[in-house]
Structures are given as C-alpha cells and as structure tokens.
Image (cartoon, coloured by chain):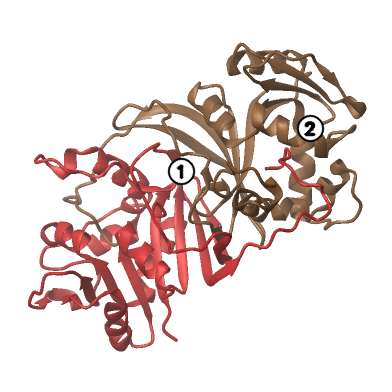
Chain colours: A brown, B red
Amino acid sequence: MTRVTAQLSVSADGFYAGPRFEGDGNWMDSAESAGFFRVTRWATEVSAWRERQGFTGGEQDTNSDVIAETFEAAGAYVMGRRMADGGEEPWGDQPPFRAPVFVVTHRPRERLLRQGGTSFTFVTDGVASAVEQARAVAGGKNVAVAGGGSLVRQVLKAGLLDELELHVVPVVLGTGLRLFDADLDLAEKEAIELTPTRVIHTPEVTHIRYAVNGRAPLVLDDRGSGGGPTVTR
Amino acid sequence: MTRVTAQLSVSADGFYAGPRFEGDGNWMDSAESAGFFRVTRWATEVSAWRERQGFTGGEQDTNSDVIAETFEAAGAYVMGRRMADGGEEPWGDQPPFRAPVFVVTHRPRERLLRQGGTSFTFVTDGVASAVEQARAVAGGKNVAVAGGGSLVRQVLKAGLLDELELHVVPVVLGTGLRLFDADLDLAEKEAIELTPTRVIHTPEVTHIRYAVNGRAPLVLDDRGSGGGPTVTR
C-alpha cells in the first residue's frame, strides 16, 4: 500500500541548512550550503548515494543501506520548486530519482523527461494535488516528499504525511532553516503525535523513523506529582 | 572525573515546554505546562522518578533505568532561578536531588537546607561560578545542569558542557520553549560538533547522549557532487 513519506537530515537543533541564501553570489559558498552540506555529509559519503549521483566509491555501511532502502521504497516523488530549480543543473541528464517527480510550483511549465526513469511534472494546483498525482503512478510504492523542509511541513500540516524519518546529525548549527519553524495550524494545547517505528544509530547520524498518528489534544496529567518543573525535564 | 552534564526532554521539533506562561492564572493549566507534561510524561510514568518524588508505583523498565542512572551519576546540580522558584513548593521538605544544588540568580538569598541531602545555594556571580562551586562538592560525580533550557543553553554557549543527553519524545508541539532558540555566539559557518556516545530507544522516547566536542568551522565539502540540493536532504 502506498504511504506518503518524508525524510530529512537535520542538526541536533533541528536545522536542515544554514540561514537562507539571499545574495547574488554563489549558493555553494553560502552559510546556507555550509549547514546543508554538514547535515547531509553522512549521505554523500556513502556508496548508495554516490551511485545514484553517478559517482563511484563511498562507504558501504549501515548508512548506505538506509539510503538504498529509501530510494528503493519510493515509486514517485513530490518536491518543492526551490529544490527542483536548484537541482536541475547538477542532476543533469540522469537525475538520481529514477521515478516520476511532481514539483509544486506557481509557474506552469512543460513536463521534463530525463534518462533513467526520472520525469519532472510541474503541478500548479497545490500540494494535495501533487501528492495525488504521485500516488497514482507510484505503483504501490511510497510517495516520497523529497523536500525542501517547507514542503515537508506543508504536507504534515495538511495531514497527508504517513511517515517521517529524521536523520539527526550530531552538530548544533545555532541558526538556519528549520523543518519545524512555522505555524502548523495547531490549536492551543494541541500536538501532532508520532510513534517511533525504527531507530538506527551510527557514529555519523541517528535515524529515527516515525509513523504520523495525527493531531491530538495535550492532556494535562500530573500523576499526582503536585506539578512544577523538576530535574527530569 | 567530574563531567558537566545536562539532559532535557524535548519534542521531535525541539521544544521542552509549551509557549511561556505569562498570565496571572495557574501555571498548571497553561499551554506551557501542557507541553512540558507531554515531553516529560515518559519520566513521570517510571518508578525511578516516582521514588525520588516520594510516590510509589510506576513502570520498572528501560526508561526507569535511564532516570535512575541520571540521578545516581549527579554529585551536585546547577539550576536556573525560574526552575528553582517553580519547584520550591512542590518539592517540599525532601527534594528529589539528594545533593547540593546551586541556583543561578540575580537575587542574593540565604542557603536553604532540606532533608535527604538537598541544599539550595544561590549564586549571584554567574553560571561559570555556579558550575565551579558545584564541581568542588561533586565528589568526583557529575555536575548536572538541571535546567531549564535557557540555563543549559548558557552553559553550552560558555563552553562548559561536556555531555548533553536529549530525551526525544515522539510528538510535534509546533510552538513553545526551545532548548536551541537563541544566539549561541556562533560565527558564520561555525557549529558546535557533538559525538553520539549512546542511543537507547523505547516506544515512549529516544535517548541520545552526546559528548560535546566544541566549536568548529563548517567546512564545505561537496565530494565532487556538483552541489545543489538533492533528494537525500
């Protein structure tokens, strides 16, 4: 059965990149990219990622297995416009997805066909439509929300996300782009409950996979403690 | 050898409590406390925490072992003023610490002696002084920074923290008090590097213990990828 999944590499303080690059210079030299490359280093070092990018070498380890499994599980992708724009050149003729990609954008554009099974379809009627179009062609595999962070947040906010995997990298960036930095339309004392379904830890990164249970009220439960902050917080 | 440690329960999006309570009402009914009780629920349910609070019952499980070990490892505590104020009444005559506690505050106050080995010493000359005073009486055990989050952040910022354990709870709060929400005085393209030294996962919480390596520059390393965002982010 098709599930809608997302996975993102984040720092211990929740950033998936450094502060947003706004200048005229080269993104590659920006603080945004410096943070982004730090939290994705575990991935770029492994064989399974490098093979998808057309590179050789790389570690063949647990982290590589996680990447390989993630690519393999995806039957179609949903992607934000900014990520698609940024990737168009470096991904070249053979993008790593090898599956249909649906790009959420305000700008209509003709479908792009690439080698190796990747196509880019530009969807202008919203994220829910992009998810549905991806589901229709996923062939029972997952619809993977490829990012960036703001698109993952939109899908979570819309209640469309079944599974979220965070690759938590052992670094504190202090500032930058956060996965969870904006309004999720939660009411006061309301939260989105998750269930951890798999945790894999390596020296480079802790992979935590969550099933998304959905919104639920925060029920105050003091268990007779009399309340107040305690050492255990 | 004495290490300076901190541990904090946080949501998957990095909050240790709901939005700060500023009103005239009861903190126990606030959104701040609702978030706080959600992320500390795993602790209040276990035997080792309940015993320290003078309660009976509770789960005797892996999470209880984590709490017991944390209490046992601490020879002295450093605490923020707000947490100390909030705890004074509920902790009563026998606070759960059973060790000297040094409270960082601007307001001089006489030392409080409590039963069971807990004392509260009010330190007005800053967090580094409080850590040193705690170290002097820790008897080779750890100096535990008990919270709240802003004090943990100060200790990390000052380069005084050796170890940080995050108890990551499977819930998205969306808003509230963040451990990492403010300036850590990091330069552009600078980060605080960590090393995960222990990961324990249970259905209720993922415990990630980090050694704090200290500040380091973010070195751009594109590994020949040509750069740009990719699916693995």
Left or right of residue B148, residue B122 in this image: left
Q: Is residue B214 above or below residue A4?
A: below
Q: Residue extending furthest front?
A: A24
Instruction: From the viewer's side, name the closer residue of A201 and B56.
Output: A201
Residue lying at 62% horizontally and 35% vertically, measured from the top left: A148
Q: Where the C terminus of chain A falls, by quadrant?
A: bottom left
Secondary structure under tag 2 reads helix
Q: Is residue A221 visible to the viewer in this orientation of the structure?
A: no
**Number of the label disc, if any, that sits on residue A88:** 2
Q: Is residue B17 visible to the viewer in this orientation of the structure?
A: yes
Q: Where the N terminus of chain A falls, by quadrant?
A: top right
Amino acid beneath label 1: Asp
Q: Quadrant of residue B184?
A: bottom left
Instruction: From the viewer's side, name the closer residue of A217 and A10.
Output: A10
Left or right of residue A69, residue A116 in this image: right
Q: Is residue A127 above or below residue B164?
A: above
Q: Which residue is mark 1?
A: B13
Amino acid beneath label 2: Glu
Instruction: From the viewer's side, name the closer residue of B141 and A97.
Output: A97
Residue lying at 46% horizontally and 62% vertically, measured from the top left: B165
Q: Quadrant of residue B75?
A: bottom left
The chain holding disc 2 is: A
* CA distance for labels 2 and 1: 30 Å
The chain holding disc 1 is: B
Left or right of residue A41, residue B54 in this image: left
Q: Is residue B99 above or below residue A108?
A: below
Q: Quadrant of residue A143?
A: top right
Residue lying at 55% horizontally and 32% vertically, measured from the top left: A150
Q: Picture coordinates of residue A181 (x, y %)?
A: 45, 39
Residue lying at 11% horizontally and 63% vertically, measured from the top left: B92
